[in-house]
Image (cartoon, helix red, strand yellow):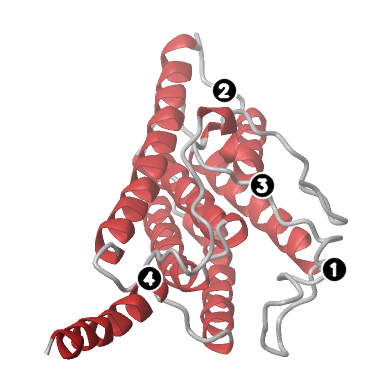
Amino acid sequence: ALRLGLGRRAAARVPEAEAAARGGGGGAVPYAAREILKYGVATAAQYGLLTAAASGLDRALPRALPKPAVWVLFAFLSLRSRVVSLLDNSRPNREAQAGKATPADVKRPAWTPPGIAFPFIWLTITGLRASAAALAYRGALRTPAHDALLLHLCVGDTWNCVTNIEKRLGVSAVGCSLVWASVLRAVVAFRASAAPVAGVVLAPSLAWISVACILTASIWSLNGRPPLYPSRTDGASAALRLKYLAQLDATTIRGGA
């Protein structure tokens, strides 16, 4: 009877061990919740720092910025908003990926654009973001439209960490929808601004984010459909670190950190 009882208990542990190995054990929900909270804290902190800086500039400057200066400011933020992110936002090394859009061990659809295309696409989007911000500028950087654009950049940086640093394919697929929603919100806000044409200028970036979301979902599907929530078995968690502030590593066509 003792041996039978031990055998039953051992057999009961097998499904539990398998569930834990898949990230579905009793600790899966608390772990996912902590990771989701981490993403929220990082995004909110970055957004708070950017809007505080914009408010400070509005108060400190004796007169309105020239529109070309606003263009340069938002072009810089579009490329380097991660300078105030608490998450590692290093861009993918194209050389290490043999020029591909994803690591060599990640399956991707045949229609995936070549890796060299992505820097040119993002530079074009940078120009659109900066142009929309400059067109809508009327002497203040803190407007609903500019705030919406800053939030979009913060959500995008968090998504970049999930995709390129943590390499969580499932979370990345879900997160891309939040990036899409944030740029849609920015387009609508610019359409309602003092320069409605700014929303039209920004709108093509919504088309590209739509393509990016379809690509991300396709990659998730082709690679075994890992969990759509943060799991210990899907990628490695990136910690919140103050040292990531002011990360100005280069993003180049050939590579970069």
**Mark closer to the observer (4, 3):** 4
User: Mark 2 or mark 1, which is nearer the start of the sequence?
Assistant: 2
Contact between labelled residues 2 and 1, with CB atoms less than 8 Å apart: no
In this rendering, the answer to whether 147 lies above or below 160 is above
Residue 193 visible in the displayed image: no
Callout 3: helix, strand or loop?
Answer: loop
Alpha carbon separation for disc pair 1 and 2: 40 Å
The residue that appears at 55% across and 76% down in the rendered structure is: 216
Q: Amino acid at mark 1?
A: Gly
User: Mark 3 or mark 2, which is nearer the start of the sequence?
Assistant: 2
The residue pinned by badge 1 equals 99
Residue 230 visible in the displayed image: yes
User: Mark 4 or mark 1, which is nearer the start of the sequence?
Assistant: 4
Badge 4: few (under 14), some or many (20 or more) residues near its Cα, within 10 Å? many
Left of 180 or right of it: where is 99?
A: right
Q: Which x, y percent locates residue 145? A: 40, 45
- Which of 239/253 is in front? 239
Q: Which image quarter holds the N terminus? A: bottom left
In this rendering, the answer to whether 102 lies above or below 32 is below
Q: Amino acid at mark 3?
A: Ser
